[in-house]
Image: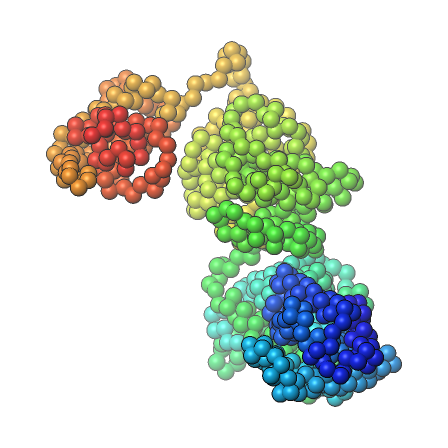
Amino acid sequence: MIQLLLQPVCVWFYWNDGLGEDLMLFSNWPTYCVCCFATAYFIYDVSDIVWHGKIREKAEVLLHHFAILFATMYVVTAVHAVGYCIVAMMVEVNTAFLHARKLMQMGGFSREQLCVRINIACNLATFCTFRFFPLTMLTLAIFTEKNRLPSWFWIYYSTSIAVLNVINVILFYRLIRTDVLSVGRYKQKSSNKKDELWWKTHRKMDSGCDRMELSRRIVGQEVVGADSELENFVTVVQIWWKKPHLVHRRIKGVDTVENPSIPERTMATFTRCGATADGGTFRKRKLIDRTGGCFVEYMWESDDRFICVPTSDDSEHCFYSRPYGVEMNTDKNDGVKVLQAFVFETSESEGAVDDDDQKLLEIFSCKLLKAMHRWISHKKGSLKLSNTLSLVNQERFWAHYRKLKANYARSLINDWTERSPAEKTVFEDISIAAYLLTIWEEERIEKGTTKMQSFVDLGCGNGLLVYLLNSEGHSGFGVDQRKRNIWDKFSSVSQLKEMRIDFTGNLDWLGKPNWIISNHADQLTPWIPIWATKLNDCNTFIIPCCPYDLFGKYQRQHNGQSHYRSYLLYIQEIMNSLDFSVNQDLLRIPSTKRICFVGRREKPCENVELKVEAVLSQPCGRPLHVSSIEKLADNSDKKSNTGENDPSRNCNNLPRSFTDELVYRIAAYLLQTKRLKRIRLDKQRVLTWNLGGEAKISDCLLLLDAEEKLMMKNMFGGFKTLLKNNHQTFQIQAGKVRLRDWSTVEIKHKEMKKTKPCWFDSTHPNGCPLTSDKCPFLHTYIF
C-alpha cells in the first residue's frame, strides 16, 4: 500500500513539476516529504526483517534496502539531490506487479490463466521502463554529478548503484527464466531445501493408476550378512513404522492404527503389488509434519517384506509419490542376506523418472535403507522399540507444541536469566506443557466438560511449566524451597511460592487441585502419590529423576535392573499400592530422564490412612504388598491412640552435647598420630599444623560404649552418617576417616556471611590452618 502511494507521486513530480531540469538542486516541500516517507519505510522494513529473524532468508532484500537507505538519509538531512531520490523511487513502480506475482505463486495459479499472463506482461514492461530507465539515469549521474557531491557520499553512491544494477539484472534474468521460458503452475518456494523436497514428493497418484499394471523396480540394496535374523527384520519394520522421524526429520509424530479398514481403491493397489490379506497384516498410520500437515499411508507386512501405499484422497496428502517397500532376500550364490528397497511404477512412468522422483529415490537408498541396515545389524534381542508419546493423540500434542513454541519460545529464550541452558530448558518445558495440555484436553472430552483442570507443581524450580500452563488458562501454582530470579518475570501470570514443605504435616496449603505435578522434583517424587492419596480425588503426573526414597537416597533392590530402572519400579509400586491407575510413557524432551508416570484416580481410595501408613512403614526401596496393609489393619487395635507421632530418627536430632563429645573423642584419637605440615598463613607467619592420622570407620566405632552404639543403631544412616554430617571436621574416603585439611580446599563463596563457628579454631591444638578472612567459618579467636 505504501509503494502504491509513492509510485504515482514520484512519476507525477518528474513529468509535471520541472524536476528533470536540475535533479541536484530541485526541491519543494511535497518532494521532500516523499523522501522522508521513503526513508521511514525502508527503516521500518529493515527493522521488521531483523526483528523476525529473517536475515538469511531476506539477504537480497536487506542488501537492496541498505544500498538505498543511507542515500535517502543523506538527502533528508542535507536537503540535497532530492530529484535523484524521486527518480530512484520511480523504480518501485514495478514492485506492485512483483508482489502480485508473489501472491499468485502462493495461490498456485497456472501460467495459462489470463490474469497471470497480463501480470507477466505488465511486470516485464514496467521492469524495462521503470527500473532500467531510472537506473540508467542514476548511473550516468556518477560521472556527471561527481563534482557536486561530497567525496565520501560519491564513493558510497557509486557502490550502491553498482549493487542495484547487479541485483536488477539477476532479478530480470529470473523473471525471464521462470515466467517466459518455463511452463506449468507456480510453485510456492520454501525457505528450506528440505521442506521444498518434502512438498515436491507429496504428489497424488494419477486417478487412473489403479487400473494400470504396476511393475516393481529396485532402487537400492544393502548386504546385511548371513547371520541376520528375520525377527530383527520384523523389529526394524516396526521401528520404521512407529518412528519414521528417525529417517525423515520433517516428520514430528505418528498415530498408528492396527487392523484398520482398508479403502477399496487402496486394497486394489495392494493386490496389484502382490500383497494379500491372508499372507500378512495391514496397518495404517497418520504422519504429522512440523507444520501441522497430516499424511496417511497404509502398510502390508509379512515376515520378510513390507509394502506401503500412500493415500490419494482429496483431503489428505501422500507421504511418497508411489507405493514402495523393503524386503530381505537370501542370495542363492553367497548365502548372504540382502535388504532391497523398491518402488512400484505404472507402465507409462517406466523409463521416465523426473527430478522429483529421483530425489525420492535418493531418500530411499541413502536414508531409509541405510537406517534399516544399521538397525538390523544389531544382535538378536538387543533391539528394543520404545513407544514415545503413547498415551496421547500425537496430532493434538504437536498442535499444542507448535502453538506454545510460536507464542512463548522466542521471548523466553531472549529474556532467560537462569544459569541453565536457555533453549534446552525452554523447549523441554514447552514439550512437557504440551503433553499435559493434551492429556487434560482428552480428559475433558471424555468427561464431556469444558472446565479447565487445576494443578499444583511441587518442586517447580524455575517456574516455567507453571507459567505456560497458567498462560493457557489452567489455574494452579508452583512451590519450591528457593526462589529463582526469573520468577519476577512470571509474577504477572503465575503464582510461585517459596516455602519449605513439611512432609508429614497438614496439606491444607495444597488446596483441592485436580493434578499434582512432579517435574524432576528429586526428594519430593515418592511423596507425590502419598499426598495425592490424602487429597483423594487427585491425579498425579511424575517425571522421576534423581533416585530418592521416602527418607533418603534410594538403594537398588531389584536384581537384574539398573539403579534408575529399579527406582522407576519402586515409584510405580508406591502408586499401585495406593490404588492409582498407573500408565508409563516416554516424553519427547531433550533429557536422559524422560520417562513419566500418569497416575489417575478412577475411584475413591478406601482406607486412606492405613494404606499411607503401610507405605511409610515399609523398608525403603522394598516392594510393597497388600498383605502389609492387612497386617497393619489387624494390629491397629494394639496401637496407642495418643495421636503423637514417633520421634524423628535423623542423626541431626541427636543431643548436641552427645555429638560434640563424640566428634572431640574421634578427633583426639586421630591426632595421636603426628603428621606435621608447614602452612604459610601470610608473608610473616608460618604455622606448623598436625594433620593427624587416618582410621577405619569400624575402628572409630570401637570408641563408643554399648549405650552409645545402641543410640546410633536407632538412627537412620548410623555412625557413618554422623561423621558425614560433621564434614567441617572429618573427611571420609574409601571407608576411612581423617581430619579435613582446609588449607587444600578451594573456597568458592568468600563473601558469604559467617554464622557457624570454626571447629579447628576453637578445638584443634594448632588452631585453624586458615586465617580468619580466608576461613569459611567464624573464628572466635583471631590471631
**Along the line of sight, the residue nearer the viewer: 120 or 361:** 120
Q: Is residue 452 in view?
A: yes
Figure quadrant of the C terminus:
top left
Question: Quadrant of the rendered structure where residue 272 is?
Answer: bottom right
Query: In the rendered view, does 355 fall on the left or right side of 550?
Result: right
Tell me the residue at 64%/45% (across/down).
468
Tell me the residue at 57%/22% (across/down).
506
Tell me the residue at 82%/81% (across/down).
15
**Along the line of sight, the residue nearer the viewer: 330 or 508:** 508
Q: Position of residue 93 (x, y in %)?
A: 78, 77
Figure quadrant of the N terminus:
bottom right
Query: In the rendered view, does 124 fall on the left or right side of 714?
Result: right
Q: Is residue 307 in view?
A: no
The answer to whether residue 307 is above or below residue 758 is: below
Q: Position of residue 274 (x, y in %)?
A: 70, 74
The answer to whether residue 388 is above or below residue 278 is: above
**Along the line of sight, the residue nearer the viewer: 617 or 228:** 617
Q: Position of residue 475 (x, y in %)?
A: 68, 37
The answer to whether residue 380 is above or below residue 770 is: below
State the residue lying farthest toward the right: 114
